[in-house]
Image (cartoon, grey):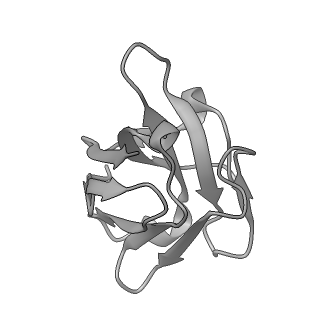
Amino acid sequence: QVQLVESGGGLVQAGGSLRLSCAASGRTFSSYAMGWFRQAPGKEREFVATISWSGSRTSYADSVKGRFTISRDNAKNTVYLQMNSLKPEDTAVYYCAAAKTLLYSVHVREYDYWGQGTQVTVSS
């Protein structure tokens, strides 16, 4: 069992930056692929970024590539999402998720555990 708690969301102006953190419980954090997803009002949850258990492999949605960076610190059981050059269309609730058996994944259905989400609002 893994419990995930996101933090770092908030209100920021367009062009600004935020860093989201996701703290995980459990001693097997380093064996999980981790992902960040987001959901805007009235829309489906969508993939943002993912990272392999070792941190050596990452993948990003085209909409955030070059602006967002995912990283992890297995010693601290934490995964991060650095978000730069934020746009109003990045406004959403951001969720982190853990997948037990995969290198990494872009699919919501392949993740086993989810955090409660943190709100990110980007004003124009």
> Based on the displayed image, in which of its 4 quarters is residue 25 positioned?
bottom left
- Measured along the vertical axis of the image, is residue 19 above or below residue 102? below
Tell me the residue at 46%/42% (across/down).
Answer: 88
Tell me the residue at 72%/56% (across/down).
Answer: 65
Image quarter in which the C terminus is found = top left
- Residue 91, horizontal then vertical, whole percent: 40, 39
- Residue 47, horizontal then vertical, whole percent: 59, 38
Going by the picture, which residue comes out furthest to the bottom?
75
Q: Nearer the viewer, residue 46 or 90?
A: 90
Q: Nearer the viewer, residue 114 or 31?
A: 114
Number of marks in the image?
A: 0
- Measured along the vertical axis of the image, is residue 38 above or below residue 26? above
Q: With 103 as the anchor, is 23 left or right in this view?
A: left
Going by the picture, which residue comes out furthest to the top?
42
> Based on the displayed image, in which of its 4 quarters is residue 8 positioned?
bottom left
- Measured along the vertical axis of the image, is residue 76 above or below residue 115? below
Tell me the residue at 34%/82% (across/down).
Answer: 76
Q: With 99 as the anchor, is 120 left or right in this view?
A: left
- Residue 54, horizontal then vertical, whole percent: 64, 75
Q: Nearer the viewer, residue 10 or 39?
A: 10
